[in-house]
Image (cartoon, rainbow, N blue to C red):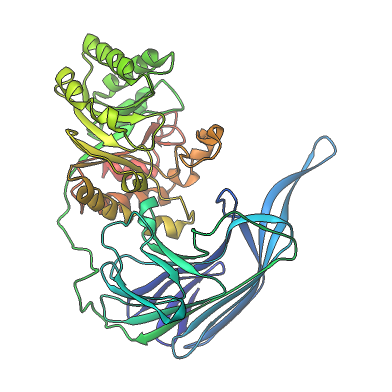
Amino acid sequence: MYLQAGSLHIFYEKGFLRQIKQNDTEVIRMIYFALRDHNWGTLDRRIENEVIESYENHFSISYTCLNIIEHQEVFGEDTNHDGAEAIFEWRVKITGDRDGKITFEIQGKAVQDVRRNRAGFCILHPIEGVATQPITIIHDADSDTETYFPRYIAANDPFLNIRAMRWQTASGGVYQLDFEGDIFQTEDQRNWGDASYKTFCTPLSLPFPVQLYKGDSVWQRVMLSVLSASATTLISDKGKVESKEPKSFALGIAASVETETLPEKAIDLLKSLNLSHYRIDLNPSLDNWITDFSNHCENAALLNLPLEIALSLDNEYEKQLADFIGVCQQNRFRIVNLLLFSNHSLTTPQELIDQIPHLKSQLPNVKIGIGTNYNFTELNRNRFEAGDTDFITFSYHPQVHAFDDLSLIENTETLRYQVESAEKLYQKPVHVSFITLRQRANPYATNAANFSVPIDRQADGRQKTEFGATWLNGVLEYLATTNVASVTIFRTVGELGLLSLVGEPYPIFECLRH
């Protein structure tokens, strides 16, 4: 529902404040709170006793929020009952005053013992109209830091030790956030695919996880104030993303991991898309890699598409490269792109980058790329010398921090900033390979057994709906405003595909056809 506090307009959804605007300028993207466990998992929540009082220019909201763990209780041999176990309880009060001041207060108590990495507020700042704008960070002991919101994606957290922050938007409005109950810092969430900067509680420099015992409490308060009203139009070009004429780029698709055989109907439909390449993943350290390679090549031939090969190597990379080159030369495969990755590194290690001149002499018609098979943040935080590579590559999915429909639509904007930042960082053409709705692997898993993500957890039912087409359309529209050279998106068939296993098209297929 929509609320108003003075000149501020707010969208209230499921206990949180979203898209706080003044005169059509987005001031804050979201104010919310979360309990994140020792593995950075965000605990589910349930709202109870919600009371909303909304008036013409002010409002008041109160509710109770329970952080819960869903589970199944087994009674007897055959009867299962869904249940939920309360871990933490929050008492919440939100007010919006006639002068535009918003106060969001939370009082939390542990219902059970829990280890937490974070318990409290996060504030999301939009990028459009805010990037490059001045901001004052107010620390303890009345010390201030004058700085700017970063234009290019910041590898490290740009703002630390925050008690309050005062900033200006491109439309001329001046705003202040005051924090009580904890110290805050800001990270650039574009690293992980979110279209926002995030100011969050509890500095990461402090040890975590923290053990909370039953009865332990957390109290925090965030206050947003309007110090100067924004104009109805931008009065500064700073922070505004340039409008550009749409550009074309090579568009490819990845091989299915749910079947080795493409139905004839799927082949005909996929050929109608006029795609540029067919991505496959090869790991020469596996015994059956040549058989997998052969099967992939047969499907690529059926689709009449050249290969984009993501080649993951281990410590015996010299032998594995020699074997790979030999197979390619012997069979004269059509390869357009070769992506060099390592099984033991988040980005392409320097010893593999140094092999590029040799690879080019053996595979002269193949473009060779390096980078990461994971999030953009790996490029940003694990930097390397690009050397003789032809392009830089990274993958993208929008669900590292948020999973709701609105956040996913908002996050389509992020690829614009990621492509621009990768270009600035490495001075090479950029390939995005590849784009999915959910993560394909968890590179941050503390247990190696959790690195691989099962197919059922990679799948998102929205991929097969009109929402999936809306999301994909937004992704492609933003990419068309960049200089991206090549994009790989989704897989051929299955739960992760453009089509079902029997070749029935999902709405995302129709989006690409048009």
Q: Nearer the viewer, residue 295 or 213?
A: 213
From the viewer's perspective, is residue 354 above or below residue 124?
A: above
Q: Residue at x 40, y 40 (%)?
A: 506
Residue 267 falls in image quadrant: top left
Q: Position of residue 282 (x, y in %)?
A: 36, 23
Number of numbered labels in the structure image: 0
Q: Is residue 70 left or right of residue 34?
A: right
Compared across the picture, whether 343 is left or right of 131 comes to right
Q: Residue furthest top?
A: 330
> In the image, 298: left or right of 237?
right
Which residue corresponds to the image point at 68% horizontal and 62% vertical from the top-left? 88
Q: Is residue 278 visible?
A: no
- Residue at 38% of width from left, 76% of height from top? 21
Instruction: Find residue 125 and report its horizontal and vertical position in percent.
Output: 38, 68
Q: Quadrant of the C terminus?
A: top left
Q: Nearer the viewer, residue 203 or 267?
A: 203
Q: Position of residue 145 (x, y in %)?
A: 34, 74
Q: Nearer the viewer, residue 498 or 86?
A: 86
Give the answer, above or below, for where 88 lies relative to 296.
below
Judge whether residue 34 can be spotted in this image: yes
x then y, percent, for residue 288: 43, 14
In the displayed image of the protein, which residue is found farthest to the bottom?
98
